[in-house]
């Protein structure tokens, strides 16, 4: 019995050893197989936002491509900045140009992972908006969202934080945030809750092409005119201030009831003399025609009578020469439930009826979507007139693509725009022009132009006489008449820009034109005087100081010629009939003015050669000249007797 027990014990030990060997060999085999990818582990979801209800996240999506004729536009992400595990909704517009019915599942993709699919039953010319929702990732960071051809970015930030954006009219503006010095533009995460921003009344900032330029505080984007603003951050938050550059081409100041306040620059766009259109093969230059009129709307916060007159000043604050030929104040009586704006002009294109006055609805519609040339959603920037601008580029093409919504059957389609053009100096502009001397026929600085969608979905240019105008350097509102420009019921619009044009607000009015009553008021008096002295390079025979009322009654080539420090004080009689019941009155200042800037490669900063109303361009060709008839000779001898032969020092 003892021998049998020992035998059983030996067998048990042997079996244990064999079992251990089997386990070791099996483990080694498994490790070898996985390390050589003979078997793939089950896929696990990437740390991206997931759909509610949670879908299966598909790596490397294999969704079918967009059907031919399906176009997407205007992606919108809400919120654009989220906290971990927060619900996010993505919407996109679609339009189907195909000719047959198609069933398609539109995928919503986040960082190359499908998080949702929306089935579409597409019929010819079908259009609409589709949305998908998902739960944001637990990981902070940026996520690329793609739907069709549209893309946007979702940013996930730590809970309890959001990005505060502060911008000023000019980059580099100093300010303090909760007492800490900062510089615009500012975009950083801050704690949710109130934050105090304080800005300076004036600031000097280096402006390329201008040097050190002084800017004066105007207002916050909500209309607050205090230097301090308390901003309550509860989501990604945008705020900003408008600053006015002190000095340009010349400047308009109006009496607002208590003081003269800055209103606008006068014809800073097409009034600039020496705009090169292109070089010719023989090396000669072709210059653009100048449209000398400007239309500046003034409301009751800017213009109030004093002792029976509306008072204004037009002054030259830069080293320039201005030629002011006519000024008139147009009173516009319109129904109280409407507003009025005028059209503007541009270079190169001869626009239809610049200065036309349109009535628009007091309740303007916002575009459905607004995307810049980089694919960035800029609808938040243009939805309110608040001094928060889109970014612009100078001497490089950019665009703003708008979806205006379904405007089928609208009696009128008017775009109300507030935008600014950040012009270079005359010297910088001329230097840019000269770089194209070896590129005949190429425009160095082409004006804006618009495109709409054709029936096949392609972008086509609007007629040249209906192109987009040049905005002022100040944030003035104007109207762009789009009625009749859309060949189909696709009301998408693309504004292409080459100058540094920044958009503050865009609204849509489809209301029919209302009856208005206009009154044209010529100046009762106009006096030219020297407001201040400073160093200037300008020379020639300038208008003598004193009464110049007769020179500003009509656009007749008999104008006030002024230089840096000169100022024209204007009075317009406030003696119109009372406003009829149900009507309100606004004013538009109409000014006919040109100016020369210092540093142009095409002329010296001298009074001569003189511009004139019928010139085809400036500098004008050899077969054109200022009309030196008897009347104009008498004007020159009577008024332009302030001869300055040498540049002056302050």
Image: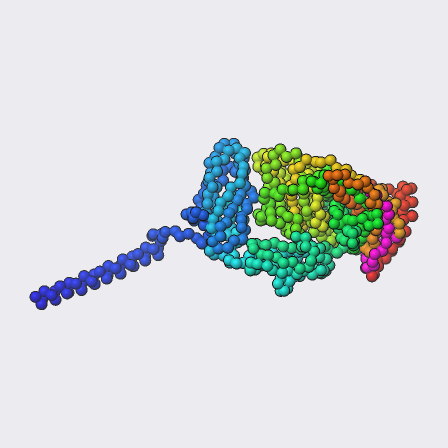
Q: Position of residue 219 (x, y in %)?
A: 69, 55
**Residue at the front extreme, as displayed:** 581
Foreground of the two, 228 or 397:
228
Image quadrant of residue 579? top right
Residue 542 forms part of the magenta stretch: yes
The vertical placement of 456 against 11, above or below, is above
Residue beneath the point at 81% across and 59% down: 535
Q: Could you tell me if residue 605 is visible in this image?
A: no
Image side of residue 44 versus residue 202, left or right: left
**Residue at the left extreme, as displayed:** 1
Residue beneath the point at 64% across and 62% down: 176
Residue beneath the point at 12% across and 66% down: 6
Q: Position of residue 514 (x, y in %)?
A: 71, 36
Magenta span: 521-545
Q: Position of residue 191 (x, y in %)?
A: 55, 60
Foreground of the two, 223 or 146:
223
Image side of residue 149 versus residue 196, left or right: left
Q: Position of residue 351 (x, y in %)?
A: 72, 39
Image quadrant of residue 162? bottom right
Foreground of the two, 39 or 192:
192
The N terminus sits in image quarter: bottom left
Residue 562 forms part of the magenta stretch: no
Residue beneath the point at 60% across and 49% down: 380
């Amino acid at each position: 019995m003892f021998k049998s027990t020992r035998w059983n014990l030996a067998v048990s030990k042997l079996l244990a050893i064999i079992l251990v060997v089997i386990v070791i060999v099996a483990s080694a085999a498994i490790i070898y197989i996985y390390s050589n990818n003979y078997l793939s582990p089950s896929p696990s979801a990437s740390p991206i936002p997931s759909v509610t209800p949670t879908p299966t996240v598909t790596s490397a999506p294999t969704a079918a491509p967009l059907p031919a004729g399906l176009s997407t536009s205007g992606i919108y992400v809400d919120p654009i900045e989220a906290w971990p595990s927060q619900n996010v909704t993505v919407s996109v517009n679609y339009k189907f140009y195909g000719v047959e019915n198609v069933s398609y599942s539109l995928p919503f993709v986040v960082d190359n992972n499908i998080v949702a699919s929306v089935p579409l039953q597409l019929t010819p010319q079908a259009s609409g908006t589709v949305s998908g929702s998902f739960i944001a990732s637990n990981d902070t960071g940026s996520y690329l969202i793609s739907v069709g051809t549209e893309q946007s970015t979702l940013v996930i930030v730590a809970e309890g934080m959001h990005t505060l954006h502060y911008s000023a009219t000019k980059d580099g503006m100093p300010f303090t945030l909760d007492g800490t010095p900062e510089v615009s533009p500012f975009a950083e995460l801050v704690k949710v809750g109130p934050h105090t921003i304080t800005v300076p009344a004036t600031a000097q900032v280096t402006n390329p092409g201008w040097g050190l330029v002084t800017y004066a505080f105007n207002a916050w984007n909500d209309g607050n005119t205090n230097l301090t603003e308390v901003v309550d951050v509860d989501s990604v938050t945008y705020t900003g201030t408008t600053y006015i550059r002190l000095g340009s081409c010349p400047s308009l100041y109006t009496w607002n009831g208590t003081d003269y306040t800055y209103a606008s620059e006068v014809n800073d766009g097409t009034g600039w003399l020496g705009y090169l259109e292109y070089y010719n093969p023989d090396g000669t230059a072709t210059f653009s025609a100048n449209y000398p009129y400007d239309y500046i709307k003034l409301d009751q916060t800017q213009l109030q009578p004093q002792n029976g007159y509306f008072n204004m000043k037009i002054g030259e604050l830069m080293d320039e020469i201005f030629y002011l030929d006519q000024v008139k104040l147009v009173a516009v009586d319109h129904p109280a439930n409407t507003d009025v704006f005028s059209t503007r002009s541009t270079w190169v294109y001869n626009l239809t009826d610049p200065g036309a006055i349109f009535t628009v609805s007091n309740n303007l519609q916002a575009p459905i979507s607004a995307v810049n040339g980089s694919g960035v959603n800029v609808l938040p920037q243009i939805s309110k007139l608040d001094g928060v601008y889109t970014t612009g580029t100078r001497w490089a093409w950019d665009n703003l693509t708008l979806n205006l919504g379904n405007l089928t059957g609208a009696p009128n389609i008017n775009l109300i725009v507030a935008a600014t053009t950040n012009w270079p100096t005359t010297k910088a502009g001329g230097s840019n022009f000269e770089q194209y001397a070896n590129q005949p026929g190429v425009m160095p600085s082409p004006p804006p132009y618009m495109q709409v969608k054709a029936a096949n979905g392609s972008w086509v240019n609007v007629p040249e006489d209906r192109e987009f105008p040049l905005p002022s350097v100040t944030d003035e509102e104007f109207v762009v008449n789009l009625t009749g420009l859309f060949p189909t019921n696709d009301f998408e619009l693309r504004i292409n820009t080459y100058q540094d044009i920044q958009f503050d607000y865009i609204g849509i009015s489809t209301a029919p034109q209302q009856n208005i009553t206009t009154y044209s008021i010529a100046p009762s008096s106009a006096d030219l005087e020297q407001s201040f002295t400073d160093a200037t390079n300008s020379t020639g025979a300038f208008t003598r100081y004193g009464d110049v009322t007769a020179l500003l009654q009509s656009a007749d080539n008999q104008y006030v010629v002024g230089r840096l420090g000169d100022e024209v004080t204007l009075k317009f009689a406030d003696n119109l009939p009372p406003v009829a019941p149900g009507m309100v009155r606004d004013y538009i200042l109409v000014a006919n003015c040109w100016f020369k800037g210092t540093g142009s490669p095409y002329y010296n900063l001298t009074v001569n050669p003189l511009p004139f109303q019928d010139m085809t361009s400036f500098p004008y060709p050899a077969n054109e000249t200022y009309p030196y008839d008897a009347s104009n000779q008498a004007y020159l001898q009577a008024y332009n007797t302030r001869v300055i032969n040498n540049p002056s020092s302050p």
